[in-house]
Image (cartoon, rainbow, N blue to C red):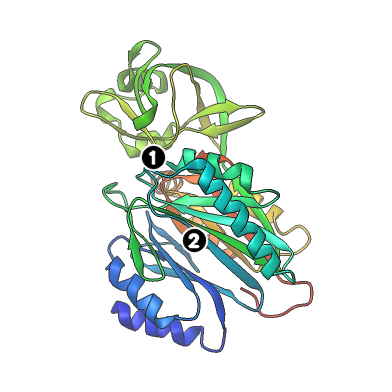
Amino acid sequence: MAHDASMAALARRFAGTDLSQLFLFVSPRADFDRVARDAARAFPGCHTVACSTAGEIGPDGYAEDAIIAVGLPAAHFATELLVVPDLAAFDGAALADRMVRTRIDLAARAQAFPTLFAFALIDGLSRREDALVAALAPALGHMSLFGGSTGDGRAFGRTRMAVNGDVLDGAAVVTLVATDCRAQVFSLDHLTPTETRMVVTAADPETRTVKEINAAPAAREYARVVGRDPDQLDTFAFAAHPVVVRLGDAHHVRAIQRVTPEGDLVFFSAIDEGMVLSVARSEDMAEHLERELSALSVHTAPSDILGCDCILRRIEAEEGQQSRAVSDVLARHRVVGFSTYGEQIGPIHINHTMTGVALYPPAAGGRRP
């Protein structure tokens, strides 16, 4: 289907519903500029925010070459946008001040909507996710934040983002949401640290590159520790043998993106010398996901879940022949969203996880989002 026809069909589907905001999660094979432009033209009365993906999550679970649309009806949602046009050069203090003002303005404008949360979309190749969420965290107040890093399939070449038809490079968009729905922000992963550990002994934090592990060349030593052939390290190997770092009482994944020709390891998130990495063991992904998402329905089932799911989880599901089982769980729990190059939860940028928000029907009823 041509993209202009897709937008026309989407506009017809939302006919009669005033939207506060429309999100579009766009396959990297689509004509992104045209999709963004057509969406802004088809929905002139609301914000349109689009990003490219590492895969999509639709009504039937994992999807490929799709455009997933999520609309927030104005009857139940109000939004404000905080756009960071240049992640390479933002001022943290100034950005935090903008966040505080935007949050206060939204709360004052939407007093009938007591629930607040924030959804961040960040260029997944910028290597600035950690710095951005750390800068925003003090300004969030009681507002929970989750998000995802935009993707480019498995090419890792260039990710895309657009706001109201304007395409941005190296940018981030944080949507502040007020709603009369109950909302629960969450993060989950199916990994348990083992006693097998390694120490980063040489690294370049700016480029998220590890040069040495245990005082040996990084890729070769990682391969030795996890029992793989160093010449066969690829995305599937990294998904099968994730590593985690302990921060306080919790563990967070530090996922490996690729091996350089020099034998270094490039990570998806922050890395530094002296960091102790534990090899993690994976639980059955479909069973874990079913259990975690079911826990969100203990009292009332969410009407929808907006999810940001790491590309490494998708790859692991494929490698373990669990794609259909995971898709069935996602579909059963009404999860929509996209596969990411990384995820955000509060002040932390992480990997190999799913972050998201479960949205529950308003107490007084009404149309679901």
Between 19 and 148, which is closer to the camera in this rendering? Answer: 19
Q: Is residue 351 visible?
A: no
Q: Residue at x 58, y 41 (%)?
A: 347
Give the number of the mark in front: 2 or 1. 1
Q: Nearer the viewer, residue 130 or 150?
A: 130
| Residue linked to disc 1 | 127
> Looking at this rendering, what residue extends furthest in the top direction?
215
Disc 1: CA contacts within 10 A as few (<14), some (14-19) or many (>=20):
many
Q: Position of residue 115 (x, y in %)?
A: 71, 62
From the top left corner, tell me how far across and down residue 282 is, in percent: 52, 36
Left or right, 23 with reference to 89: right
* Quarter where residue 297 is shown: bottom right
Q: Residue at x 27, y 68 (%)?
A: 31
Q: Quadrant of the C terminus?
A: bottom right
Q: Which residue is pictured at 42% across the width and 41% down the height?
A: 128
Would you say 256 lies left or right of 345 here? left
Residue for point 79% across, 77% down: 364
Which one is nearer the viewer's eye here, 190 or 169?
169
Residue 126 shows up from this direction: yes
Q: CA distance from mark 2 to mark 1?
A: 22 Å
Inspect the image, locate mark 1, and give the three-letter code of the amino acid beneath it.
Arg
Identify the disc placed on residue 337. Answer: 2
Q: Secondary structure at mark 2?
A: strand
Image height of 54 relative to 191, above or below: below
Residue 97: give x, y in percent of width and height: 57, 49
Q: Quadrant of residue 73?
A: bottom right
Q: Is residue 358 above or below residue 95?
A: below
Residue type highlighted by circle 2: Gly
> Is 366 left or right of 100, judged from the image as shown?
right
Q: Specify which label sits upstream in the sequence, 2 or 1.
A: 1
Badge 2: how crowded within 10 Å, few (<14), some, or many (20+)? many
User: Do callouts 2 and 1 mark residues in contact (Cβ within 8 Å)?
Assistant: no
